[in-house]
Image (cartoon, helix red, strand yellow):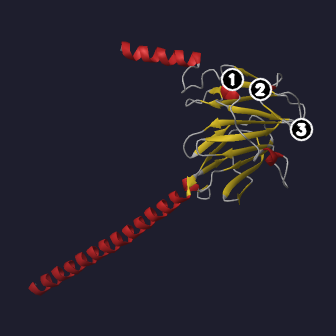
Amino acid sequence: MRRTLALCLLALLAVSAGCTSLFGPGELSDDQLNENTTYDDVWNRTTTGDQPPSVYIDVRTDDYRAVYDLGENRTTLDVYGRTGFGLERPLDVSGLRFRFDNGTVVSPANHSNFTVEQGREQLTITVPEENGSLAFTAPKGGKSFSVPAFIQDVSYEAALPPGVDVAVPLLSNVDPSPTRTFDEAGRTHIYWDSVSRDVSVRYYLDRDLLIFGSLAGLLVVAGVVGGVYYLRQIRELERRREEVALDVNREE
């Protein structure tokens, strides 16, 4: 009993202090915030094309890179993740960058007006000016990712890692339902015209589909073989019953 009580008190302290990885990251270091990361291949996704998204998420194996077009009248962005209990926690970001409207890119280390304030439930990122884009990298695990709608009622696009898909609902899930999905350069892209709640995507590897198809085929074959076997057994029983009935009639 005492041991259980001690464990409960320890968990309560962890919640209040936010000091364990289960409930969120510890204090983010300057080195992490200014980590050497490039976004050259994703900056223009929010400004070019027929329907450029306001938010672009480049999903990789162990993390994702996100670019936010902050638009007019916005110089701060509150970012957070969720714990296993659904509570908000500061997002464990790294490689923060801000791109001015003229294309100049800065990190918090080389611009005094580019700051991060870490609270118990979120990070408040302040950028140097309006009409720019904010980028950061955040960790993810497994074959899924979830991103809160830090900016609502705008378009989002997510590019999944190569060799994965969301075409089979039984093996995947996309929430909210996307406006469309399309393939580009060997990657599945998911596009939403407007997002007002958390984006959550679970995907599968192409080889998972092959394995699933093989297992389904084996089950079908096993079902057919089993059905034929039981049908023969039933017919054999019917034949024996008819023979027994015939023998009884002869004896009478």
Which residue bears the numbered disc 3?
101
Which residue bears the numbered disc 1?
30
Give the x, y percent position of residue 84: 55, 31
Which residue bears the numbered disc 2?
108
Observer-nearest residue: 4 or 116?
Answer: 116
Give the x, y percent position of residue 165: 61, 56
Instruction: Please tell me how crowded label 1 is: few (under 14), some (14-19), or many (20+) other residues with Cα within 10 Å.
Output: few
Total tally of numbered discs in the picture? 3
Q: CA distance from mark 3 to mark 2?
A: 17 Å
Instruction: Please tell me how crowded label 2 is: few (under 14), some (14-19), or many (20+) other residues with Cα within 10 Å.
Output: many
Give the x, y percent position of residue 167: 62, 58
Q: Residue at image x 58%, y 16%? A: 17
Task: Label 2, secondary structure: give it.
Answer: helix
> Which quadrant: the N terminus?
top left
> Which quadrant: the C terminus?
bottom left
Task: Label 1, secondary structure: give it.
Answer: helix
Q: CA distance from mark 1 to mark 2?
A: 8 Å
Q: Nearer the viewer, mark 1 or mark 3?
A: 1
Question: Which of the labelled discs sits on residue 187, or is there none?
Answer: none
Along the polypeptide, which appears first: circle 1 or circle 3?
Answer: 1
Type of the residue with mark 2: Pro
Type of the residue with mark 1: Asp
Task: Label 3, secondary structure: give it.
Answer: loop
Relative side of 238 to 210, left or right: left
Instruction: Please tell me how crowded label 3 is: few (under 14), some (14-19), or many (20+) other residues with Cα within 10 Å.
Output: few
